[in-house]
Structures are given as structure tokens and as C-alpha cells.
Image: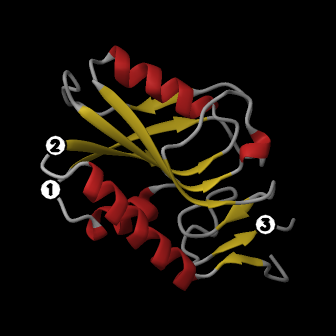
Amino acid sequence: MEEKRILLTKEEIDRKVKELAGEISRKYAGEEVLVIGVLKGAWIFMADLVRAMDMDVVCDFVRVASYGSGTETSGQIFLLYWPEMDFTGKKVLVVDDIADSGLTSVFLRKKFLEEGAVSVEFCVLLDKPSRRKTDFRPDYVGFTIPDHFVVGYGMDCNERYRNLPHVEVYED
């Protein structure tokens, strides 16, 4: 990448993560919630989010793929890793980096409910509603952004740029 076009600074992200953590902590006060991060893009966001939560959490991850090596979703969801835990009667909070087409989120909600979860909510750092191919709406949204392919703060292009402390528009 040559010229950076920073969309969200580290400071903006830090403030929003704390705000989301407070909102989630208030909602689930006194309850057990399973926080499930979507690998690989959400791991940095999830780590910061759960550290800022004022509650006990049980954490694990799922890994799905729909992008391959490109910047456009294939439309097919491939389940690569599923947690070895019992979801029966549990409340699940899925943490994802970005809500784009909504296909992955719809797939995950259905799978968690089939596994016995009593509720499934979604917290996303970024929401791109202009890309939605379903009626999915995240429950907690950090930032709504325009239709750009972005990298940084855990998000990548061909496994690169995850380590950036901010979010920037990826320019080929």
C-alpha cells in the first residue's frame, strides 16, 4: 500500500470499544454470556472488547471463510472451526470485525440456535449496510462505514495488514 487513507484512528477505535463494552456489560449484568469471536478478523477487536467488559465471560472462536484471497465475498460460507462447548440454554454474543453481506452472520445465528443457544446477538466493529444481501442487522455496532474494502485492527487483505492499529481503506 502506498498512500494511506485512514478511516478510523486508534483513538477513535479505543473510545468506541470501551463504549460498546459498557453497553454490553450493562445488558448482560449478572448473566453468563458466551463471547464467540469470528476468526481471523475479529481477534484484536474481541480481545480489546472483553478486557473492557465489566463482567465474567467465557470466550471461544469460530472460523468461517467466504472471501478466499479476493476482496469480494464468494457468497458461500465454509465452516473451518467450531467450538467444543455446549450451547444448550446459553446466551451467545458473536463478535465480528465487519458486517458486510450478512451471509456469515445469518449462517452463524442459525448454527448457534440449532446447537441450543437461547439467544444470539452480534457485536461488530464495522457495519457496511450498503453491501447487505440479507435482512441481518447487528445488535451492537462500532462504526457504520461506506462501501470500502478496509484493513487494519485485525482485518486483512491476503493475511497482511492485520497489525495496523487503525482502520484504513485498502487501495490496490
Q: Do the residues labelled 1 and 2 touch (CB within 8 Å)?
A: yes
The circle on residue 56 is: 1
Q: At label 2, which amino acid type do we have? A: Glu
**Quadrant location of residue 61?**
top left
Q: Quadrant of the N terminus?
A: bottom right
At a point 78% along the width and 66% down the height, the residue shown is 170
Q: Residue 75 carries which label?
A: none
Tell me the kind of residue under disc 1. Asp
Say which residue label 3 marks: 170
Q: How far apart are marks 2 and 3 (CA)?
A: 38 Å
Q: Position of residue 4 (x, y in %)?
A: 79, 81
- Packing grade of label 2 (10 A; few <14, some 14-19, many >=20) is some
Q: Do the residues labelled 2 and 3 touch (CB within 8 Å)?
A: no
Left/right of residue 150 with respect to residue 53 in the rendered view: right
Relative height, residue 121 to residue 123 (above, below): above
Q: Residue at x 80, y 78 (%)?
A: 5
Image spot of residue 87 (x, y percent): 23, 26
Horizontal side of residue 141 vs 54, given as left or right: right
Whether residue 165 is visible, yes or no, is no
Task: Answer with mark 1 or mark 2, whichever residue precedes in sequence.
Answer: 2
Which residue shows up at 61% across the image and 69% down it?
152
On screen, 121 above or below 53?
A: above
Crowd tier of the residue under label 3, counting other residues whose Cα lies within 10 Å: few below 14, some 14–19, many 20 or above: many
Residue position marked by numbered label 2 in the rendering: 32
Say which quadrant the C terminus sits in: bottom right
